[in-house]
Amino acid sequence: MDGATLEAMRSALRGPVIGPQDAEYTEARTIYNAMIDRRPAAIARCADAADVMAAVAFARDRGLELAVRGGGHSGPGLCLVDGGVTLDLSPMREVRTDPAARTAQVGGGARLGDLDHATHAFGLATPTGIVSLTGVGGLTLGGGHGYLTRKYGLTVDNLLAADVVLADGSFVTASETEHPDLFWALRGGGGNFGVVTGFTYRLHPVDTVGVAFTVWPVDRTREVLAWYREFLPQAPEDVYGFFSLFTVPPGPPFPEEIHGRKMCGVVWCHTGDLSRLEEAFTAVHEAGPPAFHAAMPMPYPVLQSAFDELFPPGYQWYWRGDFFDDIPDAAVDVHLKYGENIPTPLSLMHLYPVDAAAHRAGPDDTAWSYRDAVWSGVFAGIDPDPANAQAVKRWCVDYWEEMHPYSMGGSYVNFMGSGEGQERVRATYRDHYDRLARIKRTYDPDNFFHANQNIAPAP
């Protein structure tokens, strides 16, 4: 992009357009995953939907590549594109809560922490993820799951409407009654169909929740997983717990004697009666005496941000994921093998429950195609040192390759890593892929929005 083109883009937008010669450029192109190093020709920080419309039209008319950045949390760095335009929604972080209607209107650049802050004041929340730095946009368009999923479903099950700028630069609102095919596709189909400048969510009564951390030595993984795979699917919907293989971080709530030790464990969230909090987790002792167990009431936004300091922006990340409906003994052995050989203190594996309320939606109600999955697994190699980037990637890929035969074949689209190939995208959408491709043909026939886990338009 030459100087004249850059200046023309600046004149078309209200928000700043940052080029490689600008002092802010290095910061502006920095995203959550430091393993990604791409240099856009321009970063357009959109002030509002009108800016998004102008930026889309500008890039399209000049044949420029376009990527969309919400929270910048994309593992494979799909929010940056070399030599093209990154459309940055980060200035659009407003959240308006309607406590009477129990809804929230959320800007496309908002993060989970923005949403939690605005809704918690009214004792309300909607299911999202587990790290408050995550952008609402990417999380929602991929489906969205977290602590409230067993109680209230996926994020997309609570999406009521979306404001979208399409590939031709036009603006529409998608809902069950307006552009229903587009609304169906947005609920799990990723960023393939347009730039979502605003989301409207259904909210639920959530204020202070019960939180517990239970950990066992990693060599107890067989016994703990054998218990967890039976207990969790039968637990009341008020009980949520994701299983993890990890290294204990050096800080609270964990006692000093287990800092730095490899462990298996469960992070629990209980949305039921807080006076019965300890009773809700008595079953953890059935897996054998834990090395540490603590339960406490906690404001929901505090739980949502509990891991923010442990995983700040700027670390090396590589992740892959898969859906699972079972955890057979042979898979347990693989988990033990890789849990005992975690390569760096921050690398981990999580199994997130996606059952209970998430199963109440029909298999074809949204683009999310794994309503029969019980767990969404992620294998993540993480380290602050670039020298360890290949080591954490190798551990992640090897772990995923040994676990994949026990999976359902596809992955949560937000847990797909770079370079996994088009067949993985098809496996993620199963029988929904062809319908998504037809909707893509209607709303983006030239595949303008392709900096994503791409669904090509149907012929």
Image (cartoon, helix red, strand yellow):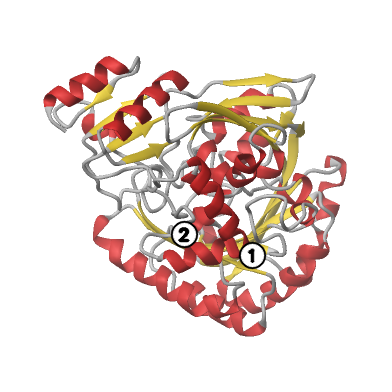
Q: Residue at x 35, y 66 (%)?
A: 393
Front one among 140 and 351 = 140
Tell me, yes or no, if residue 379 can be seen here: no
Q: Secondary structure at mark 2?
A: loop
Report which quarter residue 59 is drawn in. Answer: top left
Residue 128 on image: x %, y %: 62, 42
Q: Amino acid at mark 2?
A: Met
Front one among 30 and 410 = 410
Tell me, yes or no, if residue 393 can be seen here: yes
42 w.r.t. 385: above or below: above
Q: Amino acid at mark 1?
A: Ala
The residue that mark 2 highlights is 416
Front one among 327 and 201 = 201
Residue 131 on image: x %, y %: 54, 43
Report which quarter residue 19 is drawn in. Answer: top left
Q: Secondary structure at mark 1?
A: loop
The residue that mark 1 highlights is 291
Position of residue 2 in the picture relative to residue 262 (left or right): left
Q: Residue at x 32, y 34 (%)?
A: 60
Q: Nearer the viewer, mark 1 or mark 2?
A: 2
Position of residue 369 in the picture relative to residue 316 (left or right): right
Counting other residues with Cα less than 10 Å from the Cα at mark 2, is it few (<14), some (14-19), or many (20 or more)?
A: many
Residue 375 on image: x %, y %: 66, 63
